[in-house]
Image (spheres, helix red, strand yellow):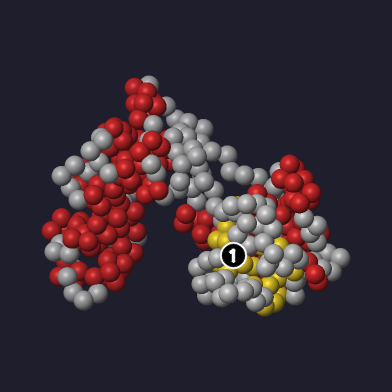
Amino acid sequence: MVRRLEADAPVKVVAELSQRAYERDSEALEALARYARDGRLVGMRDYVVAALAKAATANASFLEANFREWLQPTSPEGHQYWAQLGLINTLGSAAYPYLIGVVSNEALATDTRAHAVKLLAQHSGQTFDAGRPSDPGHWRIEDIEVARLSKWASSGYPKGTGYVLPITDPSLESPVTRLEKAASHLNQLLHKERQQKLDPANPSNMLVQASTETMAAIRSYFKLPSNYLEFLERFSPLNVIVESRRFINGLQLYGAGDLIPGQLGYSINAMTNEAIQEWPSTMIVIGNDGGDPYTLDLSRTAPSDAPVSRAPHGSGGWRFRQVAPSFIEFIEQLK
């Protein structure tokens, strides 16, 4: 197997071995561990350590020594980063002292230390990552609260209460109306992303209930069709990115809290807060795909809904093309 990893398609072989490792194939786990130690492709070795860390469980205790070795300051940064996940997956709370050591080590890269904080928070139920980015690579050094973590360690690593996820509308599970069914359809599309990437400190790809204050601000700022207002109130997208072949970069679908600031750069000058004359005043931006706006066309609003249009940005002028005759149909068409 190690020889196969040195062949022309190592990523494919690692993926194959990783799948077997997730299924608790000890031969695959051992082959990956040997390559992480001795493989000739240095970049691939980091990838292998990541695969091992994700596949590791308490039943793979023979990997513990590998993860401890890869966590040493003399190991490659990629090994250090992923070995933390491997240790916590194999040792559970017994890995906390090792990760506290990483957090306290100022010689290590910021993202490596931040990753330790995220893992400690997620496993212990503490809120050390509150207000921080989901990706440790985006943390700043001042985001790492060494004193707070050290105090927690000296107190015996008490369990926290974790985060409470935002409230969702029960009709997402048992829809009746057409709008509820459209929202439930979107919720199912986002389910896989939530399973893979849900960060309790920064929930994403969720449809949640908007606050009364936010909806009041929207109603005072816009005159929107009732279907869209109800969607925002009951099924407000929270950090939603819809991935599809239909979208180049993924559709960022605005939630209630995003709608007003989401007009900046389109209808409103972000520097002066003044209206941009070139923008059609009847177009309300409800999301964007890499900067290409998706809009509700209020010039053709029916009593309860409005068409959805799209325009490419950076082409010297806005040329809108209708993509759905109503907002509900736009959501229903998402795949």
Res 196 seen here: yes
Secondary structure type for disc 1: strand
Q: Residue at x 80, y 57 (%)?
A: 223
Q: Residues within 10 Å of mark 1 (few under 14, many from 20)?
A: many
Q: Is residue 201 left or right of residue 298?
A: left
From the viewer's side, name the closer residue of 265 and 204. 265
Res 189 seen here: no
Q: Residue at x 31, y 67 (%)?
A: 15
Write down the quadrant of residue 294 in the picture: bottom right
Please say if 307 is above or below 217.
Answer: below
Q: Residue at x 54, y 48 (%)?
A: 203
Look at the image and tell me in which quarter the C terminus lies: bottom right
The image shows residue 231 at horizontal and vertical percentages of 73, 57
Give the farthest residue toward the right.
303
Give the residue type at disc 1: Asn
Residue that badge 1 annotates:
288
Please say if 120 is above or below 275.
Answer: above
Look at the image and tell me in which quarter the N terminus lies: bottom left
Q: Is residue 307 left or right of residue 249?
A: right
The image shows residue 186 at horizontal and vertical percentages of 63, 63
Q: Residue at x 65, y 45 (%)?
A: 167
The image shows residue 171 at horizontal and vertical percentages of 72, 55
Give the farthest residue toward the top.
155
Write down the quadrant of residue 113 in the picture: top left
Please say if 9 is above or below 206.
Answer: below
